[in-house]
Amino acid sequence: MLGVTKNLKAPSTIIRLKDEFGKYQNKSQYAKNKLEYTILSDIVVKNQIYYDPKNNDFDTEIEDDKGMLKMYKTFLDFPDHRRFQHPEQPVNKKNHKPNDWDVVWPAAVRRKTWLGRAMTIECPVVGIDWWDAYAYAQWSQGRLPTLSEWAVAAGFEGQSLNVSLWGPVGHDQMDVTGVGLAGMAGNVREWTAVPEINPAESLAPKAYVAAGDSFENRDGGILARLWVDSRSARRSDLGFRVIAKK
């Protein structure tokens, strides 16, 4: 799992702060010194996490998530999504159901196929737009990562070695970063929070970015970026990842 500073300093600062963990003998001492980290992962974070110098890992209490179908179904079943929606969401958008949801969910529950893909309820949600991803993140008490946060997470302590194919979240152990973040290179692309300039078209307006590659296009891997013209765009290989709120 990745720890990122609350104000997301440069990677060198993250590493420097990480080196300071050795000064503290236990989590309570570390917490008192307010070197608090949050996590960017395949899961929604409900609390702060702390580095454990004894086993070189992060110690945290977390809830299972990522944009998995099973969690998205829970979100859809929530009776009122209005307070989680972005204030700029189009008025003609009536719900947050993914494309083909009435076929996708039964196929996942029954472990059948959909569009030739083997489905389980642990597979990532696709066919959702930015508004859907935003609302889900708010409902889960999290938020979407910015592209810079996503990029720091992707490269921290080693990038994924493989672009994973379609499957349940975390199914390909070669598509895992050095700190345990699964599926950042492949499986599905992931919506990020804010519009960015495309370096290849620096004079063009900022646009929202889908980070990482997918099972449908494995050329760029963890370095792949897709600039999307509209927040209402949906793709069969585009999902999301959630970060804890600052």
Image: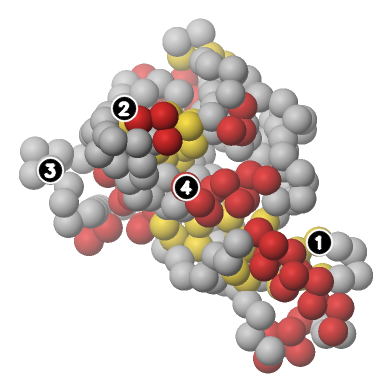
Quarter of the image with the N terminus is: bottom right
Point out the tag, 4 or 2, that comes first from the N-terminus: 4
Residue 187, position as x, y percentages in the image: 58, 27
> Is residue 137 depicted above or below 185 in this figure?
below
Residue 135, position as x, y percentages in the image: 31, 51
Crowdedness near tag 3: few (<14), some (14–19) or many (≥20) residues, C-alpha within 10 Å: few
User: Which amino acid is tagged 4?
Assistant: Leu
Instruction: From the image, tell me which residue sits under label 1.
Output: 57
Point out the tag, 4 or 1, that comes first from the N-terminus: 1
Point out the tag, 1 or 2, that comes first from the N-terminus: 1
Point out the tag, 4 or 3, that comes first from the N-terminus: 3
The CA distance from mark 4 to mark 1 is 24 Å
The reply, left or right, for residue 227 in relation to residue 89 is right
Residue 147 numbered mark, or none = 4
Disc 1 is placed on an element classified as: strand
Q: Farthest residue to the left: give it.
A: 91
The CA distance from mark 3 to mark 2 is 15 Å
Residue 90 numbered mark, or none = 3
Disc 4 is placed on an element classified as: helix
Can you tell which quarter of the image residue 93 is in?
top left
Can you tell which quarter of the image residue 32 is in?
bottom right
Q: Nearer the viewer, residue 123 or 229?
A: 229
Instruction: From the image, tell me which residue sits under label 2.
Output: 234
Disc 2 is placed on an element classified as: loop
> Is residue 132 depicted above or below 188 in this figure?
below
